[in-house]
Image: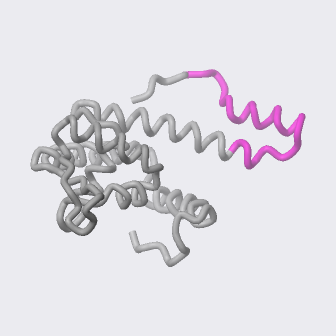
Amino acid sequence: MPTPLELPFDPIARAAQTWEERFGRSDAMAAVTSIMRAQQILLAELDAVLRPYGLTFARYEALVLLSFSRQGALPMRVIGDRLMVHPTSATNTIDRLERQGLVVRRPNPRDGRGKLAEITGRGRDVVSRATTDLMGAEFGLAGFDPAQREQLFSLLRGLRVAAGDFTAAPAPAG
């Protein structure tokens, strides 16, 4: 859990007010600054939940992705694509998970040069226990009810579509 700042005012609202006086409309600046602060808060909370497992949220996501795959293994390129990170970041994440004994690398039978990352039994156990804890913490969003979380997802989905993360198809029913 992040350390509360307990400021006597909302610094983003104050910045928005000053922005308005100096530059004009502040709604976009205030929204993006709020999103960036929310990311800091959420990462701190999620990392605190995952710390007992020796995981960061990035490593947890990689383990979940591997556990979702049919064979428990995926090519490194696919891991980077699905996690929406640079290939170097995917490699570093898998390197750390491999050092922890949660993932192993093996040759890709479909591509003699490529490698697959495969979740181990220990990795499956860790991801299962960590998921239980994250779900108990409602992934840091316990302050929102389910309808608000759906609304938040929907709003941010529009941003992701506009960025080209994926083609816009109807969102799955939640």
Q: In which quarter of the image is residue 158?
A: bottom right
Q: Residue furthest left?
A: 121
Question: How many discs appear?
Answer: 0
Residue 70, percent from left and from top: 20, 68
- Whether residue 11 is in magenta: the answer is yes
Q: Residue furthest bottom?
A: 169
Q: What residue is shown at x 27% (from left), y 45% (from top)?
A: 136
- Residue 11 placement, left or right of 114: right
Residue 89, percent from left and from top: 42, 44
Residue 127, percent from left and from top: 21, 47
In the image shown, does 143 or 113 lie closer to the viewer?
Answer: 113
- Whether residue 72 is in magenta: the answer is no
Query: How does the figure colour the protein chain or chains?
Result: one colour
Q: Name the image quarter holding the N terminus.
A: top left
Q: In which quarter of the image is residue 95?
A: top left
- Residue 87 placement, left or right of 133: right
In the image shown, does 67 or 21 lie closer to the viewer?
Answer: 67
Q: What residue is shown at x 73% (from left), y 49% (from top)?
A: 28
In the image, residue 30 sits, relative to residue 107, either above or below, namely above
Q: What residue is shown at x 88% (from left), y 43% (from top)?
A: 24
What residue range appears in magenta? 6-30
- Residue 172 placement, left or right of 11: left
Q: Residue furthest front?
A: 112
Q: Name the image quarter holding the C terminus.
A: bottom left
Residue 141, percent from left and from top: 42, 46
Q: Main secondary structure of the magenta part?
A: helix
Q: What residue is shown at x 52% (from left), y 69% (from top)?
A: 166
